[in-house]
């Protein structure tokens, strides 16, 4: 059965791009629908097992495999399919581009036209805003390649383990400049679970919700402000009126029901 409901805006996908767009619209008072082909990732002790790694979970979608033409150790690869997108399974490392990244060398650009239309200074305020949303920890001024920043990190870095302290001291004795990685992981906010240093960050969902992924720190807050999130839903067609997209047709992966949603 098909049904229609109208929103001010429809966002397809709940990864970094979709979630940040939804945030701006919800904060502006819009009625926003977010459609996500994946489901919410359950949190608990099972996330600590080896089968909690992304490519061993149902959230690694192989239904439309991507062919690997060069590099890698597999001929095909799947993609992340979960509310919050890759943020749920990434390791939390949150580097900024450097100023030089906006001026690629000629041998990379060649005739591709792949050039930034602006420099780092244009994006810097948005980097600061994103770091605040994600609660990124770090220590400004310790990374010799760090670009200019207008704000300090929202959190201090976690204390180094004993072995890491020895590595840092050895590196410094050689004239090197070790620094703590900028991490979107909760170390200081006692209002929620803080990191227990379990080492299952990269490729695992955080069992206790201490990683500051979108499904933990952003989407629930937006839901409280009116965002509608419908998981397990695949968009099959964009509905157009003239040159303008006015809606989407989709199908539920759980019930098979077809639905139409409109925006505007």
Image: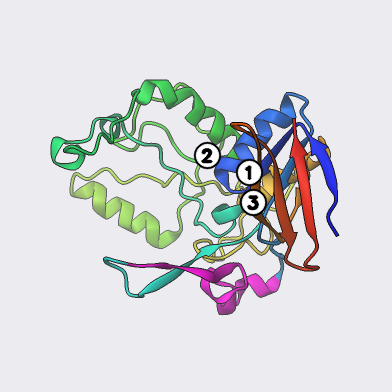
Marks 3 and 2, the one that precedes in the sequence: 2
Does the magenta portion include 43? no
> CA–CA distance between discs 3 and 2?
45 Å
How many numbered discs, if any? 3
Quarter of the picture containing the C terminus is: top right
Residue that numbered label 1 is attached to = 188
Closer to the chain start, of discs 1 and 2, is: 2
Residue visible at 32% across and 52% down in the picture: 168
> Which residue is the site of mark 3?
237
Q: Which of 234 and 218 is in front in this view?
A: 234
Q: Which residue is drawn at 33% across and 38% down?
A: 143
Q: Estimate how packed mark 2 is, as few (under 14), some (14 to 19) or many (20 or more) residues with alpha carbons within 10 Å.
A: some
Mark 3 and mark 1 residues within 8 Å of each other at the beta carbon: no
Q: What stretch is highlighted in magenta?
A: 45-68
Measure the C-alpha gap from mark 1 to mark 2: 8 Å
- Judging from the image, what secondary structure is the residue with disc 1 in? loop
State whether residue 8 is above or below residue 220.
above
């Amino acid at each position: 059965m098909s049904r229609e409901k109208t929103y001010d805006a429809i966002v397809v996908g709940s990864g970094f791009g979709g979630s940040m767009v939804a945030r701006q619209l919800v904060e502006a008072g819009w009625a926003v629908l977010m459609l996500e082909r994946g489901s919410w990732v359950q949190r608990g002790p099972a996330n600590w097992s080896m089968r909690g790694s992304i490519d061993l979970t149902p959230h690694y979608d192989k239904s439309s495999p991507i062919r690997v033409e060069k590099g890698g150790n597999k001929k095909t690869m799947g993609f992340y399919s979960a509310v919050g997108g890759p943020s749920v399974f990434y390791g939390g490392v949150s580097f900024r581009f450097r100023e030089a990244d906006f001026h690629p060398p000629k041998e990379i650009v060649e005739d591709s036209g792949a050039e930034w239309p602006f420099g780092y200074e244009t994006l810097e305020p948005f980097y600061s805003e994103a770091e605040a949303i994600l609660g990124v920890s770090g220590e400004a001024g310790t990374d010799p390649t760090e670009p200019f920043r207008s704000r300090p990190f929202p959190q201090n870095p976690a204390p180094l383990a004993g072995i890491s302290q020895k590595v840092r001291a050895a590196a410094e004795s050689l004239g090197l400049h070790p620094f703590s990685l900028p991490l979107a992981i909760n170390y200081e906010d006692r209002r929620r679970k803080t990191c227990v240093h379990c080492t299952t960050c990269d490729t695992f969902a955080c069992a206790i919700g201490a990683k500051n992924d979108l499904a933990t720190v952003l989407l629930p807050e937006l839901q409280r402000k009116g965002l509608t999130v419908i998981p397990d839903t695949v968009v099959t067609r964009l509905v157009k009126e003239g040159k303008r997209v006015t809606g989407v047709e989709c199908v539920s992966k759980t019930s098979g029901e077809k639905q139409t949603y409109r925006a505007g």
